[in-house]
């Protein structure tokens, strides 16, 4: 496990390459590409509705929904491969997750703009476990006030990026486009959605 230095804050962030057992990675990728109901949703940004530059799906325990950029997502049931990875992360970290947002980047033209996890249903200090399957992509973290403070992480297939306590408060992140990448990557971000009153 490699600690990622997010000073000046003492934000907890680390990367574990080869977290998903090699024997599982290709099977997971193939079955998720084929079996998940991927959608190119629209979100509200800069005063208008725009199509996201990637495909996505939301999975969670029954009854949980998730809203970001005015898009309300109802949960699909857990895909068995996603549920298995969730169990592996929970065993390794002791942290429980009840939801996951899945992103399918079809190639290097698909991307994710700068943002942080600040939806009220994630609570004041969200902990997010982010799994990568497939093509390697560059992931950037940028300090919200010290904009020159930039970290670049190469997310390899099977890796787990842990964005723990303190990360979302001071840092935002993005996954830029790249001409070099011609194949697909799936990202799964496991999250804990709090109950309706956002206090438990
Ligand atoms: O694809 C990634 O690694 C980033 C995903 C992400 O930032 C998100 O789901 O909000």
Image (tube, helix red, strand yellow):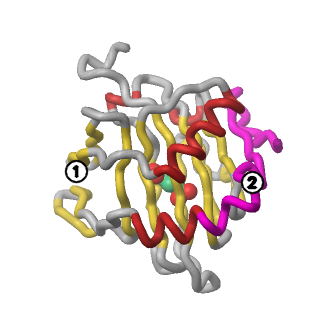
Q: How many marks?
A: 2
The span shown in magenta is 1-27
Q: Please rate how many residues cluster around mark 2, counting C-alpha atoms within 10 Å: few if below 14, some from 14 to 19, many from 20.
A: few
Q: Position of residue 51 (x, y in %)?
A: 26, 69
Q: Is the residue indicated by label 2 positioned so its CB lies within 8 Å of ligand 1?
A: no
- The residue that appears at 22% across and 50% down in the rendered structure is 71
User: In the rendered view, would you say 133 is above or below 150?
Assistant: below
Circles 2 and 1 in contact, beta carbons < 8 Å: no
Observer-side mark, 2 or 1, equals 2
Judged left or right of residue 49, residue 140 is: right
Viewer can see residue 132 = yes
Q: In the rendering, which numbered label is found on residue 21?
A: 2
| Extreme residue in the left direction | 48
Gap between marks 2 and 1, in whole Å? Answer: 34 Å
Viewer can see residue 155 = no
Q: Secondary structure at mark 2?
A: loop
Q: Secondary structure at mark 1?
A: strand
Specify whether residue 69 is painted magenta: no
- The residue that appears at 53% across and 58% down in the rendered structure is 187
User: In the rendered view, would you say 120 is above or below 148?
Assistant: above
Q: Which residue is mark 1?
A: 71
Q: Mark 2 or mark 1: name the one nearer the start of the chain.
A: 2
Quadrant (top left/top right/bottom left/bottom right) for the C terminus: top left
């Amino acid at each position: 496990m490699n600690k990622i230095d997010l000073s000046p804050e003492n934000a907890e962030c680390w990367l574990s390459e080869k977290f998903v057992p090699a024997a599982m990675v290709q099977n997971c990728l193939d079955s998720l590409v084929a079996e998940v109901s991927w959608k190119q949703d629209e979100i509200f940004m800069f005063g208008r509705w725009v199509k996201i530059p990637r495909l996505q799906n939301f999975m969670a325990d029954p009854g949980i929904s998730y809203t970001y950029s005015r898009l309300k997502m109802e949960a699909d049931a857990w895909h068995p491969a996603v549920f298995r990875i969730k169990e592996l992360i929970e065993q390794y970290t002791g942290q429980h997750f009840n939801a996951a947002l899945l992103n399918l980047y079809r190639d290097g033209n698909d991307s994710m703009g700068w943002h942080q996890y600040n939806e009220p249903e994630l609570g004041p200090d969200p902990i997010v476990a982010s799994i990568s399957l497939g093509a390697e992509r560059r992931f950037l973290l940028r300090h919200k006030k010290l904009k020159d403070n930039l970290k670049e992480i190469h997310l390899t297939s099977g890796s787990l990026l842990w964005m723990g306590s303190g990360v979302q408060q001071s840092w935002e992140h993005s996954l830029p486009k790249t001409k070099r990448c011609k194949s697909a990557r799936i990202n799964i971000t496991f999250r804990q959605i709090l109950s309706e009153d956002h206090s438990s």
